[in-house]
Amino acid sequence: MASGGFFGWLRHNAEHYLLVDSQKQMAERHGTVAPRSPKGAKDVFWRKIFAPIYAVLPWSLRSTIMKSMPGSHRKTWAAPATPQGASSALDQFQFVTPTVSVAKANAHSPEKKESTVAQIVGTRAQAGDAIVDYDQKLFDDIQAEAGEKAYIFMHTVPYEGSVGLVNMLTCTRINRKGFDTSLVLYGPGVLMGSATRGFPTVGSEAFPGHLAYNNQLQTFMKEGGKVLACRFAMAALYGMRETDLIEGIQPIHPLDILDCTLTARREGALVMQTWTL
């Protein structure tokens, strides 16, 4: 007998044979192989008697029977404990729960149902307010030592998310710390280096931030950073010519992507990888 005594045995067999019955119905409906035919008195009872009777019982009766049986399905979850000190963060707010009367239409007489709507009253932040501690910094401002290098690899679709622009800003900051920094664009990342971007004409900004990628790449290169772009991604994937790249970006052979990574490893350089689709 299954664990849980009689009720555990009953629940175990009911679940098993109702599942077998469902598989049989699905097989008949779709013309596939059905479960084997009943063998023995036990199979005959559960599949030929119990399952058909259970199927015609009203759901309300089935639900009542299941809820009346002991078992783990009747257990309830304990309310989560309030973290220590959690209430102190809410001290500045006042919680108001006004009562609202909701009229419910009825054929004979309207009924009123009492409901509550939570409102949080607090001080609204104003322009110029600091909502976090901007001055605290835990780590030293590390600067590069002589000869240290950094390679930033980006396999990133422009404008599909902020990661490309954010990592480009990070790349610029690394360069400003004194690292000899190379930004490697491959896969969809080569699109960030397009010099033909703009609408209705090249170089025209169709919306605020439209040319942010171009502007940041030019800033990075003006400050001494190197930008490399994979020729395979340019030609095979996006039909870009080398003349379509922002001036100063160096096209490279697709095999150089791996060798660039291995070079960075051999040089003990800082490496950052961004891979998004």
Image (spheres, grey):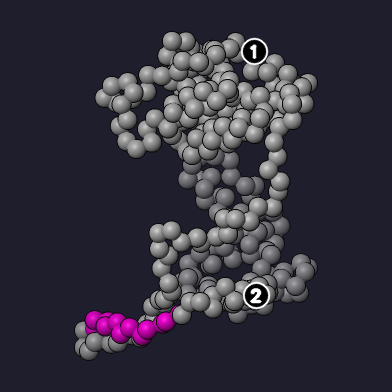
Q: Position of residue 143 (x, y in %)?
A: 69, 36
* 202 and 185: which is toward the camera: 202
- Secondary element under disc 2, as helix, strand or loop, is loop
- Magenta segment, principal secondary structure? strand
Residue found at x 62% / y 47%: 35
Compared with 211, 43 (above or below) is: below
Residue found at x 34% / y 23%: 203
Residue 136 falls inside the magenta stretch: no
Residue found at x 41% / y 68%: 124
Compared with 162, 228 (above or below) is: above
Residue found at x 66% / y 68%: 11
* Mark 2 crowdedness (10 Å alpha carbons): few <14, some 14-19, many ≥20: few
- Secondary element under disc 1, as helix, strand or loop, is loop
Q: Position of residue 180 (x, y in %)?
A: 66, 24
Q: Which mark is residue 255?
A: 1
Ranked by sequence position, the earlier of labels 1 and 2 is 2
267 left or right, relative to 206: right
In the image, the segment drawn in magenta is 95-106
Residue 269 appearing in the image: no
Q: Position of residue 108 (x, y in %)?
A: 21, 88
Q: Amino acid at mark 1?
A: Leu
Q: Amino acid at mark 2?
A: Gly
Residue 97 falls inside the magenta stretch: yes
Residue at the far left: name it.
108
Compared with 4, 186 (above or below) is: above
Q: Which mark is residue 191?
A: none
* Location of the N terminus (image quadrant): bottom right
For residue 117, what is the image quadrant? bottom left
According to the picture, the residue beneath numbered tag 2 turns out to be 85
